[in-house]
Image (cartoon, rainbow, N blue to C red):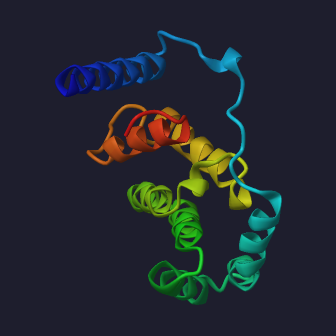
Amino acid sequence: MARERGTALLVAAVVACLGWAAVEAGHVDWSRLGDPPSVVPPVERRRVEESFAAIRADLGADRTEAAVLALRRRTEHGPYAGTAWFLLGEVAAAQGAYVAAVRHYRRAVEQDPVVADRNGPFGSGDVIEARLTALLDGVWATERPPEVRDLYYLRRRLGGGCE
């Protein structure tokens, strides 16, 4: 009985992964199914965004070094370490350090799955998706570095797929 259940779970996982592979390859269009429901309560999102107000002000005033230092502290001691990793990814992307940006986005999603939500703090899910699409269509369109694995991992996570 336990072996049959284990086999059934394995088959379900393989089918799910193959389904996402088909979506990424462009063979299946699941967009007509609609967006998944948000898991981020509006009050929590506002609280997270407010807690990063000073850091965002530093970024806006071109005090990047101070902002990055504050973000690094937040990744180690919190609160909201996942959002801090997301903002570090944004800084890296703005500086053209795309490999570092993808690495930071991955850490953000692994640290706090809410970051992958389209209604996450700062619209992080949508922002990451847009950055990844821009990389695939632009800089990494012809020559893809080994870090493209992290990019595809993130796209699956953002879409709710298997890891």
Most foreground residue, 94 or 42: 42
- Quadrant in which residue 129 is drawn: top right
Residue 62 versus residue 25 in the image, above or below: below
Outermost residue toward the top in this view: 27
Q: Residue 133 location, x and y as percent?
A: 55, 37
- Quadrant in which residue 22 is drawn: top left
Q: Residue 142 location, x and y as percent?
A: 37, 31
Image point (43%, 23%), residue name: 20
Q: Residue 160 location, x and y as percent?
A: 53, 36
On the rendered image, what quadrant is the N terminus found in? top left
Residue 131 versus residue 70 in the image, above or below: above
Image point (48%, 19%), residue name: 23
Outermost residue toward the left in this view: 3
Residue 141 versus residue 85 in the image, above or below: above
Most foreground residue, 143 or 124: 124
Looking at the image, residue 69 sits to the left or right of residue 144; the answer is: right
Most foreground residue, 150 or 111: 111
Most foreground residue, 112 or 86: 112
Image point (32%, 42%), residue name: 149
Image point (22%, 19%), residue name: 4
